[in-house]
Image: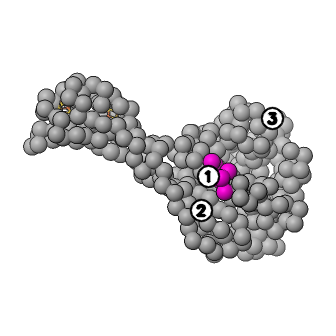
Amino acid sequence: MGYLARKDPEIKGVILLDCDVDAPNLALLFKSKSDIVNKDLYTTLKANFLEEKCVHCKKCIDEHYCEFNALYWNDEQQIPIIDYLSCEGCGACAYLCPEKAFLIEAVKSGVIKSYTTINDIPLIYGETILGSTTSGKTVTECKNFAEEVNKSISAQLEVIDGPPGIGCPVIATISGLNYVIAMVEPTPSALHDMIRVIEVTNQFKIPFSIIVNKADLESEFQEKFKQYIIEKNYNVIGRIPFDFSVARAISNAQPVVEYAPNSKASIAIKEIYKNIKNIIQKI
Ligand code: SF4
Ligand code: SF4
């Protein structure tokens, strides 16, 4: 959609934002023509052990200070060891240790990357570091970063690729948007996820519509899926058929509408773009 918007003379500027910070992939499709700018994020708290303060009483282990099982005992050194991947930075150990031998500190949790693509679209995406616990905050930081970028270019449209599921990153992505488009495939798990995303979207009172991907998949579930969408009266703004061109475009690191503009999928996507543009104009 961002690629088509960039080519559209009626849209005055577009920014692409990949908020799937646990597995960003838009950068795979949009090659860079500028240097990548990195901004480190420190949104995760972790415990740090201050060995010089420890009196080896072992209370932290015997009294089970850590509900997340992130502390274990080193018999040889007679000190607690912190498992950093398990530590949630809750602060209980720092609060309970009589010698204040734990300190809670902000650690590097991720990075925001931005560059201009070869299609002249600013692309911003976040990457979460393994073990950090704040992908929702990373999403918020990415959105704030995009706002800053947009102050200098005044793009009319921000297209956000959101994360799957309904967790913190999804909530952080949806919050404050003008419109949400839920991509769904006619499978039981995808429908289940879509229903939950729509529940979240409704909580924010944000209008939404649906795009059905791989819409022509043959399965026993198809009929049930179609029936459900009709019963709920959801606004379906397009159906993208299963098309190997999509996989080939991804392998070539290009949007399918650029790689195979006359493919079944591209024709459907262009039709969807027209529908989205109508919606944007109304908004
Ligand atoms: S960290 Fe604190 S509670 Fe744990 S052994 Fe050392 S002094 Fe005792
Ligand atoms: S900060 Fe919380 S999660 Fe981390 S080690 Fe201390 S008690 Fe465990």
Segment tinted magenta in the rendering:
143-149
Q: Which of 265 and 59 is in front in this view?
A: 59
What numbered label is drawn on residue 145?
A: 1
Quadrant (top left/top right/bottom left/bottom right) for the C terminus: top right
- Residue 24 in which image quadrant: bottom right
Decide whether residue 147 is among the magenta residues: yes
Quadrant (top left/top right/bottom left/bottom right) for the N terminus: bottom right
What numbered label is drawn on residue 114?
A: 2
- Residue 151 in which image quadrant: bottom right
What residue lies at 35% left-to-right and 31% top-to-bottom? 91
Q: Nearer the viewer, residue 252 or 134?
A: 134
Q: In this view, does 244 lie to the left or right of 7?
A: left
Which residue has dot 3 on it? 232
Disc with the residue nearer the chain's start (1 vs 3): 1
Q: Residue furthest front?
A: 152
Q: Nearer the viewer, mark 3 or mark 2?
A: 2
Q: Is residue 180 left or right of residue 69?
A: right
Residue kind at label 1, given as amino acid type = Phe
Cβ–Cβ under 8 Å for marks 2 and 1: yes
Disc with the residue nearer the chain's start (2 vs 1): 2
Q: In this view, does 187 lie to the left or right of 6?
A: left
